[in-house]
Image (tube, rainbow, N blue to C red):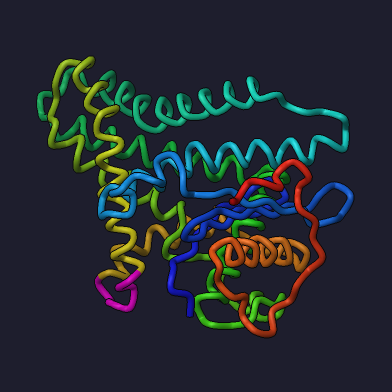
Amino acid sequence: MSRFNYGGQALIEGVLMRGRNAIAVAFRHPDGQIVWASESLRSGPHAWRLARAPFARGLIVLYETLIVGTRWLIRSANIQASAEGIELGRGSIALMLGLTLALGVGVFFLLPLFIATATTSSIQADWVQHTVEGLVRVGIFLGYLALIARAPDIRRVFEYHGAEHMTIHALEAGDPLTTDAVRKYPTAHPRCGTEFLVVVIALSIFAFGLVGRQSLPIMVVSRLLLIPVIAAVGYEILRFGAKHRANPLVKVIMAPGILVQMITTKRPTDDQIEVAIVSMEQALEADGESIPTGSELPERERLPDTAAAVA
């Protein structure tokens, strides 16, 4: 069984796996070949002395998801678009990263506040405003997932999401990384980013309730300032829930996160599982870990401009 809790993220026609000291990504190139790259996690915020300390590590994961993960998500889109001669420049990628972050904060944290404030302005009880805000936030989150899941391209991303989870399950069970071994596992995983978002939304209802009904500018600022605090606490709750999932009470409390994964993960095809296997094997190699005996070694090529990504 692996000593490190490997995690990951689905990309467009690909999978990102996060290891101890590096991330690895693998994509199905438009020509059918699997291409891969790795990137060190020994610089930037990852190099901070307290980067792996409780609560601080949650902020690092948030950074990886919003910045590193989104950057590779856009890169994966570039790889697929390359077949049509389309390529985004660094400026365009930076702009998309900024817009993605602003849109996420605006839609999932500020929009529910504005709706709740407008619809409950004549009601004196503070709890009504907080309840409406929480319900709107949950509704937007679930509605957004259900809507995008209808798009064929997003469904393929969700299939790669399932392949990522299934591969992690196989590694944690000590199985060889083969298509047959991976396929027997469920697509849901207790450390999933979707489950993290569910925990964050639940915590936000509680945390924003403590702020109380203030003037609108103060409530807006409080939402922005509390996002990293909620993320840090939420990550620790997620780790605790994953570690103690056998406990019946913990299982019930964390059940909504597993249920939401019914939307965000789908059963993958064999070729999608192969991509996830390559990503995991490259993450293990970047960490200096051995690949489980008996694992498949699908043919792969390194992305030509990432040869020095991991020193």
Residue farthest toward the left in the current orientation of the protein? 124
Magenta span includes 246: yes
Is residue 263 at least partly visible in the picture?
A: no
Residue at 33 percent across and 23 percent down: it is 115
Location of residue 146 in the rendering, given as x and y in whole percent from the top left corner = 55, 45
Left or right: 160 with respect to 219? right
Quadrant of residue 287 in the image? bottom right
Q: Is residue 192 above or below residue 136?
A: below
Residue at 56 percent across and 38 percent down: it is 70
Is residue 297 at least partly visible in the picture?
A: yes
In this rendered view, identify the residue nearer to me: 49 or 59.
49
Q: Is residue 170 above or below residue 30?
A: below
Location of residue 264 in the rendering, given as x and y in whole percent from the top left corner = 55, 53
In this rendered view, identify the residue nearer to me: 38 or 87.
38
Q: Is residue 69 above or below residue 286?
A: above
Location of residue 135 in the rendering, given as x and y in whole percent from the top left corner = 32, 39
Residue at 72 percent across and 50 percent down: it is 13
Magenta span includes 33: no
Left or right: 27 with respect to 108? right
Q: Which residues are magenta?
A: 243-249
Q: How many marks?
A: 0
Left or right: 157 with respect to 84? left
Residue farthest toward the front in the current orientation of the protein? 311
Residue at 62 percent across and 79 percent down: it is 184
